[in-house]
Amino acid sequence: MSVGPDVQKRVFRRFLFPIISLTLLLVAGTAGYRWMESLGTIDALYMTVITISTVGFGEVKPLSPTGRLFTIGLIFSGGGLVAYTLSGTAAFVLSGEWRANWARKKRHNMLAHISHHVIICGYGRIGRQVAHELKAEGIPFVVVDLSPEKIADIMESGYLALQGNASSEANLKEAGIDRARGLVAAANSDAENVFIVLTARSMRKDLLIVARANFEESEPKLLRAGANRLILPYRITGRRMVTMLVRPDVADFLDDVAHAGGMELLLEQVQIMPASPLVGKTLSQAQLPSKLGITVVACKLPNGQLNMRIGPDTVLQANARLIALGTREQLQALIKLAQR
């Protein structure tokens, strides 16, 4: 929801009376000096300005008694108006409203220009962790949540956020769904996530949507609503705990690769573009391990089938995705080769 125009209207209304009053005072003062002292328009305006501002410059010519009385009235009127304007300005500045207005305008401009980002719907424990991981990956994101307290917390963390219902088309549009690379439905309620997914899918048929589900019976509903991927936190937690108990070394390896951070080895997916020189070659012909130092773990075929039995005779197809293990530099070299 856009708040910029409403705030601008409030600021305009706050200073509308002083602006109109000052304009009328200048007009009245100029007209008064022209009529009482027979001054030209410029001289009359000059007299009005120096009288209202009390700067103390000399008079254009000696004033008549009537002109002096008029000047006294102008001084009191102008002084009162200046005092009123200064007090209103001070209250506006000290209240922090101008800072809040500036922050809202800045956020509105950022939302209007952000692209290739992820929209996080819901900022509970799951949404907070998603934001943390996306920040670590250097991927821009926008958080949409109803809670003002959570929005304030998000803003303090330096994240881009939007207060409102994540299942609202208007809010998703303002969050830049037409330019987003993906959406995470991380609300606490499965029903709310279904509505979020339905709305997002109706707005973008090609959007990658990952949804959270608390209960297994919610899985088919979320899939029918349009989610591409589902995460059941309790199921995943149970599996990981068993892996740590039964195969602790495997669990350590997966943790190190998935959350490498400053470590040397990373696991990445790389799409082979049709114009790449890799297309049509076997893995042995491509010589990825010897040339780039890359280890290909798996290959997702264009039809969506995941090939886990990668061998030297595996043919690399256009639009297939390689799951590769290597250093950041090695993976960057593979990406360039695959997208050439």
Image (tube, rainbow, N blue to C red):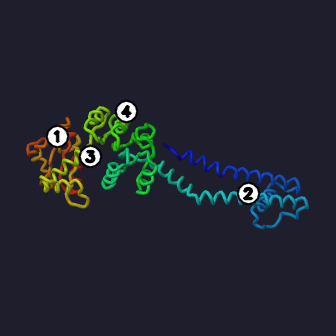
Residue 42 in picture, x, y percent from top left: 79, 56
Mark sitting earlier along the chain (1/3): 3
Disc 3 is placed on an element classified as helix
| Residue 210 seen by the camera | no
Q: Which of pointers 1 and 2 indicates the residue nearer the eye?
A: 2
Disc 1 is placed on an element classified as strand
Tell me the distance, in whole angstroms, between the alpha carbons under discs 4 and 2.
55 Å
Tell me the distance, in whole angstroms, between the alpha carbons under discs 2 and 3.
63 Å
Left or right of 250 on screen, residue 179: right
Q: Residue at x 64, y 48 (%)?
A: 13
| Residue denoted by label 1 | 306
Tell me the distance, in whole angstroms, between the alpha carbons under discs 1 and 3.
23 Å
Tell me the distance, in whole angstroms, between the alpha carbons under discs 3 and 4.
26 Å
Mark sitting earlier along the chain (3/4): 4
| Residue 244 seen by the camera | yes
Look at the numbered discs 1 and 2 and tell me whether their residues touch, using CB distance below 8 Å: no
Disc 4 is placed on an element classified as helix
Residue 17 in picture, x, y percent from top left: 70, 50
Look at the numbered discs 1 and 4 and tell me whether their residues touch, using CB distance below 8 Å: no
Residue 295 in picture, x, y percent from top left: 14, 52
| Residue denoted by label 3 | 233
The amino acid beneath tag 1 is Leu
Toward which corner of the image does residue 214 lie, by quadrant?
Answer: top left
Left or right of 247 on screen, residue 185: right
| Residue denoted by label 4 | 202
| Residue denoted by label 2 | 81
